[in-house]
Amino acid sequence: MSKTTLTRRGVLRTGAVAGAGVALPTIFTASSARAFTNEPTGGSVTLGFNVPQTGPYADEGADELRAYELAVEHLNGGGDGGMMQTFSSKALEGSGILGKKVEYVTGDTQTKSDAARASAKSMIEKDGAIMITGGSSSGVAVAVQGLCQEAGVIFMAGLTHSNDTTGKDKKANGFRHFFNAYMSGAALAPVLAKAYGEDRKAYHLTADYTWGWTQEESIKAATEALGWETVEAVKTPLAQTDFSSYIAPVLNSGADVLVLNHYGGNMVNSLTNAVQFGLREKQANGKNFEIVVPLFSRLMARGAGENIKGILGSTNWHWSLQDEGTKAFVKSFGTKYGFPPSQAAHTCYVQTLLYADAVQRAGSFDPCAVAEALEGYEFDGLGNGPTLYRAEDHQCFKDVLVVRGKENPTSEFDLLEVVEITPRGQVEYAPDHPMFAGGALGSCNPGV
Amino acid sequence: MDAIILQILNGLDKGSAYALIALGLTLIFGTLGVVNFAHGALFMIGAFCAVTLNRLLTLSHQVVDETRTDFLGNPLKVDVPYMQDIFGEATGAAIIDWSVPLAILFSIPIMIGFGVIMERGLIKHFYKRPHADQILVTFGLAIVLQEVIKQIFGANPIPTPAPDVFRGSFDFGTMLGFDPNVIIYPYWRLVYFGFAAIIIGAVFAFLQFTTFGMVVRAGMADRETVGLLGINIDRRFTIMFGLAAAVAGLAGVMYAPINSPNYHMGMDFLVLSFVVVVVGGMGSLPGAVLAGFLLGILESFASMNQIKSILPGIDQIIIYLVAIIILLTRPRGLMGRKGVMED
């Protein structure tokens, strides 16, 4: 009979050694692949949709959220698949992303930079979001992009039109599908010259913040290059609601075109005021007085009502386009929600698919691998024709639409008609273009 | 010279809105001693009365138009307003066109009722509480009201046009011997100014020439003595609250075509209107009106390019700058009375 001495200390020692032995291979495998923020471990992956749910852009945010929900449904294999059917890349199979079911959390940007950063931070830290996307303002996009860079997650910008987002404030972890102010100017100027002539004098009213400044600079440069003269450019406070005191002096300034570098509520009010003053029925310098709104959105057009009719502007995308991608998306969105999607909804849907596709192609959720898969990526079938995600600044290059307020709309969503599809070549610029100078992309940050 | 006349004209309509809101604020403060931060919300609700009436008048049924298709390729459903079915196409369209002026009649009972319920249901419980409590509860109410409106009507501005005959602008310049198009002013803004003048005149006449008004003025001067004389001053003050709500509401109704109403418009006016009340002198009705127009016109001048080129950004701070100067030189405001908020 042998005597076994089993002590507490002995059991602990043996257990620790055995535990370390079992854990050893895992430690080695873990260190062989790079760790990154919020690496998904279970059977699902969480995306963070940061959109304005309250505040003046809440309606635009609601449309973005509808698009995100649709994208998630399609990624998980639900619905009719939407633009996944027409997308040139066939990496997505409707089985989530890398086999993981896509889930999402939402945050409210309130269209305030600090609130947007706080909601993005909470989604990254508390909810484990691997990617942040959305937004309806350039101020917010720049702020959240900076946060995502620090946190080590990918930021797929929503609606942001300032040159700075992929100009002086560009970041390696940030990507923009939406077009920018420079592209608006480059696309719009030739159409304006054709419609209103090359001998025109323009008066600019500009919202006094990052987007307004770059928009004014871009439109001025593009129109002056075609022979237009800029008579005056006046900055208006962002919080302004009544623009009458800014519009009243316009007719007597020698100008015959008014350019409204305003967005959202600013644009609705300034355009309404300008029409009230009867500017569009007036003559100046022997020509009909004209109003131009360089950046249009459907939600703004709805706010401005009748006043939008006949006015030229530009958009990133419009549901009336007849390519296969657009038709698939409009059908999918329209069937689910009962009305056509806005350009904000489109860019958000596309950004989600592009992110998912990049992960799938990279075979990893690692932000640096995803960024690499997106950089220099050429794709088609997502509603804008052949598109390039340029590696140097993470800006998408694609055709730009010049649109006009429709004279006889058939519904409250049918407010704009496409006047011209400006080819991509005409809106391209060098990465070191002066309007985009300053700042550096830096290197990608995987976090942790 | 022409630029100066132009900016004075411009200041008039903005000043009218400030004056109307400040008048209501002062009425409430003078009678009930309550600092009503929900007054901007009453202005906003007035504007949404115009939106609501417009929606009611344009209630439609759908008729399928087989010749056209919607965005999904199905036959287009065209909205036909019931008003056109009932009154014929021309008359129905004319009634819809005149929805904003019609909303004046629609909004008066709504706003008075709203004001009375607000006073009886909430504000009266705060009469004896410090001003800070009154500010908190009325500010909270303003936020609740604006969120309710946003829930119902959405966050986007809603276009609410004036009748077609008021489209375009009047050329003052040619009347005064200037070239055409130098001094132009939209017709609807002229209507707004005229409307504001009538309302302000009516409120003053009501207080000055009616027995009811006399009692209210007596109550404003010495509430206790009027009460001791056996007059139920509380009931009259409640009616005055309703009246002040109606004044703010009417200012909102008529403002709807100037800027498309949105849920936030009340807050945009509220802070400025308080500055107007303080500059005019707390509790002084003529002071509120005077300061409203004065600040409206000054704000217009500050947005002139010539002035902005010398003092950039002056258009954003002018009102507060003037308020500081006036309060430093005349601490009771332009026409403030001694003893108001000084105990």
Image (cartoon, coloured by chain):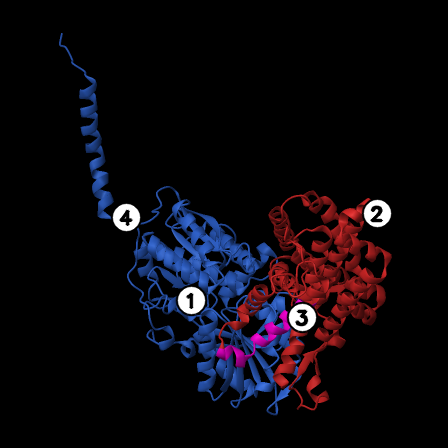
Q: Quadrant of residue B79?
A: bottom right
Colour given to chain B in the rendered image: red
- Per the image, the residue denoted by label 1 is A380
Label 3 marks a residue whose chain is: B
Q: Amino acid at mark 1?
A: Asp
Q: Main secondary structure of the magenta part?
A: helix
Q: Chain of mark 1?
A: A
Q: Which residue is mark 4?
A: A35
Q: Answer yes or no: are tags 3 and 2 on the same subunit.
A: yes
Sequence order check, earlier mark of 3 and 2: 2
The answer to which of B229 and B62 lies nearer the viewer is: B229
Q: Residue at x 74, y 68 (%)?
A: B196
Task: Write down the residue under mark 3.
Answer: B293
* Near-viewer residue (B159 or A159): B159
Position of A63 relative to B12 (above/below):
above
Q: Using a 10 Å C-alpha cutoff, classify the residue at mark 1 as few (fewer than 14 neighbours), some (14 to 19) or many (20 or more).
A: some
On whether residue A232 falls in the magenta region, the answer is no
**How would you rate the neighbour count of disc 4 (Cα within 10 Å): few for under 14, some for 14-19, many for 20 or more?**
few
Residue B231 is marked as 2
| Chain at tag 2 | B
Q: Is residue A165 visible?
A: yes
Residue B293, magenta (yes or no): yes
For disc 3, the neighbor class at 10 Å (few under 14, some 14 to 19, many from 20) is many
Q: Chain of mark 4?
A: A
Which region of the structure is painted magenta? B290-310
Between A174 and B275, the one lying in front of the other is: B275
Which colour is chain A painted?
blue
Q: Is residue A327 left or right of residue B245?
A: left
Amino acid type, mark 4: Ala
The three-letter code of the residue at mark 3 reads Phe
Quadrant, the N terminus of chain A: top left
